[in-house]
Image (cartoon, grey):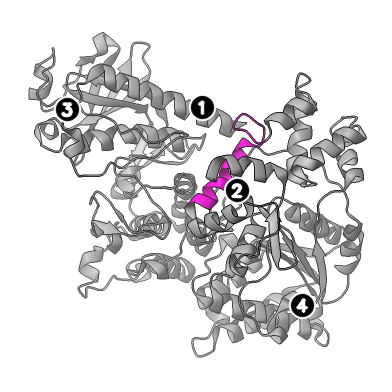
C-alpha cells in the first residue's frame, strides 16, 4: 500500500512542478538546439523535460539577481518564508536555513546567482528541478534520507527547492571537533547511510556525492541522514552513458572522472568506503586520478591501528580503482563490514537479471498451505548430512518453506544459519568465501577468526574447508541447519559458482563418513535450473532431496481462500485459476483484496486483472521493467505472445524467464505461464 501512495505522490508532485514551470517561465524557442542531455528520471510517464526561465526575462524583484546571498531576515513569497542564515554553498547551489510563518524550520536550496548569467542555464535548471523529482522518488519513509517538503517555488529568477531541516551536525564537523570515531559508531552511521543508498539505487539512481559533508547526524540521536542529491543521476546497468562531470576528489571513483562511462551502485560504494576511511582515520583519501598515476592509498589501519583487519580489508576492497573488482552493490559492501540491513523485500540485485530490481508489490499475509512434500522435508532435515534443494520461480513460497524447515529443526534443538547470497560479494572467490565464513560464524555468535585460519599460501577453497573443520564446526554442540537462499545469484560468476557449488557437494559427500560434517544440514534455495557447466560429480544439484514447488490445485485454492475468511465456490475458484493459475502470491493478493473490500466482486477483480487499474499492476510493471532492461529477454518473450503454441527459445533465455516466473517449460519448449501474463504483455510490448 505504501508503494501506491508513493507513486501517486510523485506523479502529482511532478504534475505540479510542470504546471508551475510553465506558469513561471517563457520557453526559449531554440531549446531543441541545445545538445546537452537532461539528467532525469521518469515516474509513471514519459519524461517531459523542464524548461528554464528565459534569459531575457526580468523579474519584478530585480534586486534578487544582483544580490550574491540573501541576508538574514530576507522574506520570500510575500513573507511565507524568512531567511535565518546561509548554511552552505557548492558549485551550483546554495542552501539557506529559513522559517515558515508558523515558525517551522526548513531548508531552501537555490541556484547560485551567477549561474543564471551563463549560457547553459537550461542544463542547470534541469539539474536543479530534477533533484525535486529524485527526492520525491527516494523519500519513502527512510529516516536516513533527507525529506522533500513537496514544494518548489520561484523567487525572482531563482528556482527554490523546499526541503526538510535536519537539526544536527555534518559528519565532517563531528570528526573535526571530536576526532576519529570508534569503529562501532562509524559502522552504525555507515549502515544507516547504506540503507538510504539502497533505496536510491532501487530507483535506478546514483547519488554520486557521498561524503561526510553530505551526511547529517541528528541531535535527537536518531542517526545519520544523507542529504544533497544535486548531482544524482539515472543509470542503466551495463550501459555507458553521458553524465555531467561533477565530483569531489577523494570520494569519486575513477569512472566518475569520465564524461562518458559505465556507472553503477559500485560508484557510490567507493564513496561510502571513502567516507568510512575518513571518519576512522581523520585523513582525506587520495584522489582516484592521483592513485591511477602511481600514488599509493595508505591502508586505513596504518593510520589508525585500532581499525580491525576485517574493516581494513573491506574499505580497501571497496576503494579498488577497477570498478568490477569492488563490491557491486551496497548490500555486498555492508556484508563485508558485517552489517545486515533489515529485510526490504528485495528479490533482485543489480548484477543479475534474476536479481536485478526491487520488489515494490504490496506484501500480503503469510497464510501458508502445507504441500505434501513439506512433511518429508521436516523428516529429512533431521538426518545426518541432509541436503534439501528447493526450486521454484519467484514468489512461489520457497523462503516460507525454508523458514518452516528451519523452525522445525530449531524446535528439535538444532542451530540455524540463514544466508541470502544477494548479501554476499560474488565477484571474487576469496572475498566471497571469506564473507561466507564470517557470516556463518556471525549467525552462531562466533567471532571472526580469519586472521588465524586463513593462509595466503593456501587456495581459497582449502582455507574455507579448513576454517569450517578447525573452527566453525568444531565449535558446535549440536547440529546446525545452513539455508542458502537465492543461490542463482552465483550463476553469472562461473568461477565462483563452480568452486563454491563444488564445495557444497564435497561437504555433502564428507558427511557420509566424517562426524563433523554430519552435523551440517544444508538447504539450497534457487529459482531456475543451473545454466552454467558443472562437473556432474561436483554439482550439488543432482544429490540430496529435490523439492519443486508447484502451483496450487483447486483444493489448495479453496483452503487458502478459507484462511482469508472467504467462502469460495468451485466455479469462482476455476475462474481465478484460469487467469493466475495456482500461483500462491497472486492468489493471496486476490483473496486479501476480496476479504478487505466487500464492494469488489470476483468478476470485477478478474476483469481488471491484466490492466493498469487491476490489483496486479505493480507486480506486472516489475516484470515489464525487467524485460525492458534486458532486450534479449524482451525479444524472446515476444515470440511466445505471437502464437498459442509452445516455442523453443535459447536455453539461457528460457532459464531466466522461468526464474522470473514468466514462462512454463513444456519439454524443451515453453509458453507464457499464465493468461494474466499473456493478456497484459500482449497489450504492452507487441
Q: Are marks 4 and 2 in contact (CB under 8 Å)?
A: no
Mark in front: 3 vs 2: 3
- For residue 360, say whether it is visible: no
Vertical order, 465 against 373 (above or below):
below
Mark in front: 4 vs 2: 4
Residue stretch rendered in magenta on the structure: 610-628
Main SS of the magenta part reads: helix
Check disc 2 and report the residue beneath it. Answer: 342
Q: Are marks 3 and 4 in contact (CB under 8 Å)?
A: no
Tell me, for residue 542, which label it has, or none. 4
Check disc 1 and report the residue beneath it. Answer: 8
Check disc 3 and report the residue beneath it. Answer: 28
Q: SS for tag 3? A: loop
Q: Which sits earlier in the primary sequence, circle 1 or circle 3?
A: 1
Q: Which sits earlier in the primary sequence, circle 3 or circle 4?
A: 3
Vertical order, 117 against 67 (above or below):
below
Amino acid at each position: 500500500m505504501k508503494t501506491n501512495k508513493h507513486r501517486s505522490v510523485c506523479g502529482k508532485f511532478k504534475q505540479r512542478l510542470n504546471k508551475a514551470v510553465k506558469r513561471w517561465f517563457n520557453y526559449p524557442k531554440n531549446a531543441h538546439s541545445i545538445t546537452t542531455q537532461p539528467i532525469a528520471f521518469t515516474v509513471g510517464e514519459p519524461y517531459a523535460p523542464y524548461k528554464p526561465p528565459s534569459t531575457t526575462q526580468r523579474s519584478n524583484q530585480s534586486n534578487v539577481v544582483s544580490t550574491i546571498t540573501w541576508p538574514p531576515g530576507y522574506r520570500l513569497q510575500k513573507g511565507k518564508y524568512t531567511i535565518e542564515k546561509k548554511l552552505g554553498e557548492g558549485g551550483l547551489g546554495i542552501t539557506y536555513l529559513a522559517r515558515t510563518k508558523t515558525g517551522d524550520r526548513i531548508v531552501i536550496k537555490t541556484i547560485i546567482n551567477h549561474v543564471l548569467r551563463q549560457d547553459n542555464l537550461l542544463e542547470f535548471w534541469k539539474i536543479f528541478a530534477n533533484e525535486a523529482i529524485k527526492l520525491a522518488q527516494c523519500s519513502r519513509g527512510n529516516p536516513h534520507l533527507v525529506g522533500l517538503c513537496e514544494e518548489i517555488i520561484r523567487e525572482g529568477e531563482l528556482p527554490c527547492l523546499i526541503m526538510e531541516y535536519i537539526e544536527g551536525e555534518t559528519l565532517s564537523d563531528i570528526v573535526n571537533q571530536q576526532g576519529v570515531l570508534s569503529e562501532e559508531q562509524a559502522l552504525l552511521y555507515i549502515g544507516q547511510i547504506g540503507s538510504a543508498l539502497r533505496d536510491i539505487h532501487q530507483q535506478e539512481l546514483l547519488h554520486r556525492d557521498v561524503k561526510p559533508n553530505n551526511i547529517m547526524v541528528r541531535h535527537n540521536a536518531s542517526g545519520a541522514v544523507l542529504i544533497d542529491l544535486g548531482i544524482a543521476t539515472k543509470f542503466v546497468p551495463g550501459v555507458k552513458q553521458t553524465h555531467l562531470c561533477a565530483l569531489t576528489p577523494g570520494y569519486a571513483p575513477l569512472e566518475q572522472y569520465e564524461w562518458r562511462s559505465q556507472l553503477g551502485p559500485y560508484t557510490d560504494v567507493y564513496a561510502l568506503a571513502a567516507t568510512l576511511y575518513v571518519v576512522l582515520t581523520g585523513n582525506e583519501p587520495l584522489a582516484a586520478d592521483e592513485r591511477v598515476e602511481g600514488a599509493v592509498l595508505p591502508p586505513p589501519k596504518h593510520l589508525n591501528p585500532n581499525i580491525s583487519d576485517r574493516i581494513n580489508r573491506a574499505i580497501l576492497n571497496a576503494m579498488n580503482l577497477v570498478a568490477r573488482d569492488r563490491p557491486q552493490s551496497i548490500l555486498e559492501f555492508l556484508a563485508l563490514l558485517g552489517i545486515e540491513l533489515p529485510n526490504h523485500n528485495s528479490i533482485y540485485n543489480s548484477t543479475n537479471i534474476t536479481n536485478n530490481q526491487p520488489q515494490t508489490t504490496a506484501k500480503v499475509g503469510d497464510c501458508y498451505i502445507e504441500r505434501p512434500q513439506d512433511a518429508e522435508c521436516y523428516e529429512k532435515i533431521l538426518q545426518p548430512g541432509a541436503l534439501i534443494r528447493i526450486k521454484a520461480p519467484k514468489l512461489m513460497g520457497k523462503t516460507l518453506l525454508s523458514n518452516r524447515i528451519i523452525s522445525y529443526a530449531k524446535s528439535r534443538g538444532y542451530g540455524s544459519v540463514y544466508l541470502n547470497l544477494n548479501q554476499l560479494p560474488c565477484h571474487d572467490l576469496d572475498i566471497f568465501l571469506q564473507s561466507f565464513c564470517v557470516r556463518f560464524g556471525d549467525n552462531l555468535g562466533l567471532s571472526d577468526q580469519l586472521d588465524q585460519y586463513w593462509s595466503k599460501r593456501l587456495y581459497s577453497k582449502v582455507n574455507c574447508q579448513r576454517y569450517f573443520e578447525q573452527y566453525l564446526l568444531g565449535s558446535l554442540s549440536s547440529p546446525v541447519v545452513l539455508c542458502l537462499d537465492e543461490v542463482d545469484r552465483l550463476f553469472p560468476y562461473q568461477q565462483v559458482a563452480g568452486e563454491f557449488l563444488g564445495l557444497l557437494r564435497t561437504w555433502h559427500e564428507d558427511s557420509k563418513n566424517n562426524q563433523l560434517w554430519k552435523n551440517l544440514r544444508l538447504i539450497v534455495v534457487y529459482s531456475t535450473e543451473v545454466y552454467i557447466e558443472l562437473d556432474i560429480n561436483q554439482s550439488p544439484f543432482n544429490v540430496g532431496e529435490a523439492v519443486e514447488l508447484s502451483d496450487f490445485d483447486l483444493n489448495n485454492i479453496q483452503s487458502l481462500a478459507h484462511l482469508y475468511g472467504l467462502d469460495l465456490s468451485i466455479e469462482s475458484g476455476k475462474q481465478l485459476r484460469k487467469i493466475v493459475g495456482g500461483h500462491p502470491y497472486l492468489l493471496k493478493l486476490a483473496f486479501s483484496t476480496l476479504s478487505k473490500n466487500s464492494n469488489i466482486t470476483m468478476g470485477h477483480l478478474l476483469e481488471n486483472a491484466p490492466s493498469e487499474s487491476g490489483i496486479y499492476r505493480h507486480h506486472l510493471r516489475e516484470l515489464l521493467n525487467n524485460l525492458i532492461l534486458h532486450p534479449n529477454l524482451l525479444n524472446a518473450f515476444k515470440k511466445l505472445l505471437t502464437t498459442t503454441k509452445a516455442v523453443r527459445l535459447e536455453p539461457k533465455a528460457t532459464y531466466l524467464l522461468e526464474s522470473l516466473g514468466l514462462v512454463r517449460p513444456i519439454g524443451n519448449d515453453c509458453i507464457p505461464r499464465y493468461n494474466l501474463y499473456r493478456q497484459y504483455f500482449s497489450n504492452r510490448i507487441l
